[in-house]
Amino acid sequence: MDIYEQIAWGMQKGYNRDQHSCCMKAKELHQAYQKAREANSQSGTKPQTCCFYKELHDKHRRDPTTTPQTTTDTSKETEPQAPGVNSKDEAEVEEAWLIALLPRAQGGVSLLVPQPNINATVAQNILLSVEYSCKGIVSIEWKHVSSWGTNKIVEWKPGSYTNISKSYKDRVNTYENGSIQLLNVGVRDAGYYVVTITEELGTNIYGTIVLTVYEIIYEDLHFVAVFFAFLTAVSAVLVCCMWFCNKSVHLFQNKRDKFKERTAEEIELQTIEC
């Protein structure tokens, strides 16, 4: 990928700049820096500066070979601007130009969100999975945005520090790839989870995961359980009634049979006596 393609890619969120416009702005910045540096190299002259002079100068001192491949056209050279100027173009190009100051192999920050929508139930543990790519040092921040407000969950720098908010203590696990695990989720945990990956030079990238939490309606389950218990009790009563009725029928039949036998015996005795 060309260096200016990287810059244009880095400005996709929030700005509409193509490769050509980024190239022209980079040339202007580079020309302004070269002019200020040449002026500062001459003795007895007033110190000159330009937009992003400090960042460019630090970058040249660390690695003088990693500069944008531009050719200086002195006939079209623009005048350097004072550091106090805060024009719209400067504000828009700042993030892109800081990306260009990085080594080409680094290429800024990239972020992958493999599962942007997650469905969960109450008391479940869920993984908010992301994967970032950056060769520099980054800080990672997660926030929760819902109808109840915006809450900071955790901020950490891999291998350095981890700051977890009090309301999420013992409920969050962090991972080196930028992911977090949220334990024992509740209905109030539903909403948007925003992760911000920030480089040491200020470049950042965002990712969002939407979490939906379904509540188990324990009242309905309780009703179903009570209903089945009631049916079981009724069935038991019916079985007992049927058993009692069956026993009663048998007793009645036995008494009737005995009565018939007794009556028959009496009739036989009367017949014999006659």
Image: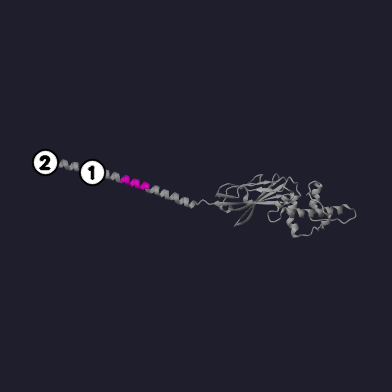
Marker disc for residue 228: none
Residue 36 x/y as whole percent = 84, 54
Residue at 68% of width from left, 51% of height from top? 205
Amino acid type indicated by mark 1: Lys
Nearer to us in this view, 214 or 148: 214
Q: Residue furthest left?
A: 274
User: In this image, 49 relative to 164: left or right?
Assistant: right
> What is the number of the mark on residue 255?
1
Point out the stretch of residues depicted in magenta: 235-244
Disc 1 crowd rating (10 Å Cα; few below 14, some 14-19, many 20+) is few
Query: Which label belongs to residue 271?
Result: 2
Mark 2 or mark 1, which has the lower sequence index?
Answer: 1
Q: Is residue 220 left or right of residue 151?
A: left
Is residue 239 found inside the magenta-colored segment of the image?
yes
Find numbered disc 1 in the image and state the secondary structure of the residue it sits on: helix
Name the foreground residue: 62 vs 227. 62
Tell me the crowding category of disc 2: few under 14, some 14 to 19, or many 20 or more residues within 10 angstroms, Cα based. Answer: few
Residue 149 counted in the magenta span: no
Q: Quadrant of the C terminus?
A: top left
